[in-house]
Image (tube, rainbow, N blue to C red):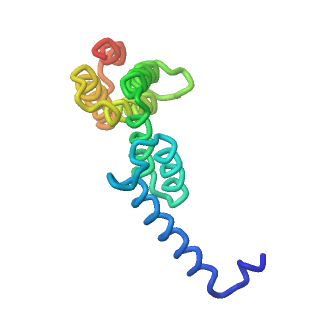
Amino acid sequence: AEVAARSDAPLERAAYWAETAEAYAALLSPGGGLATEPKVHLLHGEFLEALGAPDAARGAFCSSYRASGEAHAYAEAFMADGVAALSDAAQPSPLQRHELALSYLGMAHCIAPATPELEEGLAAVRRARDALLRGADGPPGEEGTVKQEL
């Protein structure tokens, strides 16, 4: 409570966030010594989420998976989750299912970008999502077709 009452508290918080961002940048730089440590990337992602930078946070989480030594297994798991999301009954609309699938497939692509099967799957789900956004629901079974493409 005392800190919140101080007139310089917002400046101190801003300085803290800026200094912490610089520290992460130094630690994760090629010469920083911790660029290959998955947990540091994970912590960096959580820091970025707290800053309100969700895209940068996802990038840091992706770096954590890539640095883990098990990137391929993580990419496959995210791809499987993306495929499963297309038929996720917890998502009430086809658009929500496609958006969820794209988030999983996007992470898989970030982890293993040179995977042709994943590239094709992402493109298929994006096309289906874009059709849903345009209001072109298409014939029944269209979602199954997209899922089969994956």
Q: Is residue 84 left or right of residue 16?
A: left
Image position, residue 21 (x, y; %): 46, 63
**Near-viewer residue (90 or 13):** 13
Residue 113: where, in percent of width, then height? Answer: 26, 32
Dividing the picture into quadrants, the one containing residue 103 is top left
Kindly give the residue lying farthest to the right in the view shown.
1
Q: Position of residue 64 (x, y in %)?
A: 44, 40
Residue found 45% across the figure and 58% down from its top: 24
Residue shown at 31%/27% (left/top)? 125
18 shown above or below 81: below
Q: Where is the N terminus found, in terms of image quarters?
A: bottom right
Left or right: residue 10 compared with residue 128: right
Q: Position of residue 39 (x, y in %)?
A: 51, 42
Question: Quarter of the image containing the C terminus?
Answer: top left
Image height of 92 relative to 133, above or below: above
In the image, residue 75 sits, relative to residue 55, either above or below, namely above
Which corner quadrant of the image does residue 110 belong to? top left
Residue at 39% x, 55% y: name it: 32
